[in-house]
Image (cartoon, rainbow, N blue to C red):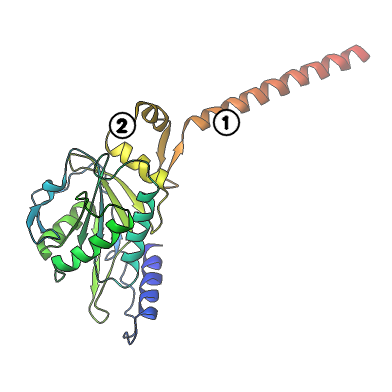
Amino acid sequence: MIALAVSLAMGLATALAPGAPPLEPVPPDSAVDVVERLNESVPLGLHFTDSNGHDVQLKDRLHGRPVILAMVYYRCPVLCGLLLKGLANALSGLDWKLGVEYDVVTVSLDPSETPALAAEKRRGYLQALGLPGSDAWAFLTGHVDDIDTLCDAIGMRYTYLASQRQFAHVAALFVLTPEGRISRYLYGVEFDPRQVKLALFEAAGGKVGTSFERVILRCYRYDSKSKKYEMFIARYFRAGGLVILLLVGGLLFALWRRELRGHA
């Protein structure tokens, strides 16, 4: 399934890129995949360069709030742009504020990309969110060793297609706790704001949001099969409804039998 998604994304990228060479074969799943490492810590001492050209460590981007981590590359012709646009759309639909309840960090997979390119991308997405001066969404570049170490820590396997000058990778977001542990994986290029909010709530250990929100959001649990948060209390309502149905059915059956005996 993941290989198919990569194939479709790369095929679309090639079709849209003028004069692009023929598409290379899709790498095997072992080369392009996400191996979930829930509750494991990311190495916070890794060094990157921010969009202002300053050297930063990953821990510098943790401010006691949950973090959405996006691994993309800024010259990506299609897939990464779709993922970041989907993320920005989800964030615009949140009633939580970027830099107050959560932060976002984007790291380039391409070690040749520059802080100037990162700054250009950052400016566009922050303007789209109406937050041009915010420092809560960082766009970073880095050395290949730090990039690979981070990808290995979060379980992201990607590969470089030399003839395409593109990176094959899975479209996913990685939600981190305020301490830098991996809390949740969100897949795709479109994200339901409610699902994003629930992932952030879970990553923060229920410490974000208003008191009323904290009560409501605790009614949701992550379903590993659907890869979504479901309202677990609804299961009890369904189970309760079934019990009531059985009781009513039993009562009707008993009354029916009594009536038959009365006519006998």
Q: Position of residue 44 (x, y in %)?
A: 11, 47
Q: Is residue 175 left or right of residue 152?
A: right
Residue 252, picture quadrant? top right
- Is residue 91 shown above or below 27? above
Q: Position of residue 82 (x, y in %)?
A: 36, 64
Q: Residue furthest bottom?
A: 19
Question: Which residue is depicted at the point 45% across and 47% down?
Answer: 226
Q: Amino acid at mark 1?
A: Arg
- Is residue 184 shown above or below 17? above
**Callout in the foreground (2, 1):** 2
Q: Which mark is residue 206?
A: 2
**Label 1 sits on residue:** 238
Residue 146, picture quadrant? bottom left
- Depth check, front residue: 81 or 205: 81
Q: Which mark is residue 68?
A: none
The crowd level at tag 1 (other Cα within 10 Å; few <14, some 14-19, many 20+) is few
- Is residue 83 shown above or below 58? below
- Depth check, front residue: 32 or 94: 94
Question: Which residue is depicted at the point 32% across and 54% down?
Answer: 129
Q: Position of residue 137 (x, y in %)?
A: 23, 52
Q: Is residue 139 left or right of residue 231?
A: left
Q: Is residue 216 visible?
A: yes
**Circle 2: element type:** loop
**Circle 1: element type:** helix
Please report whichever mark, 2 or 1, sits nearer to the chain's N-terminal start: 2
Question: Which residue is depicted at the point 28% across and 64% down?
Answer: 30
- Depth check, front residue: 42 or 87: 87
Residue 128, picture quadrant? bottom left
Q: Amino acid at mark 2?
A: Gly
Q: What whole-number distance in Å separates the C-alpha atoms at marks 2 and 1? A: 26 Å
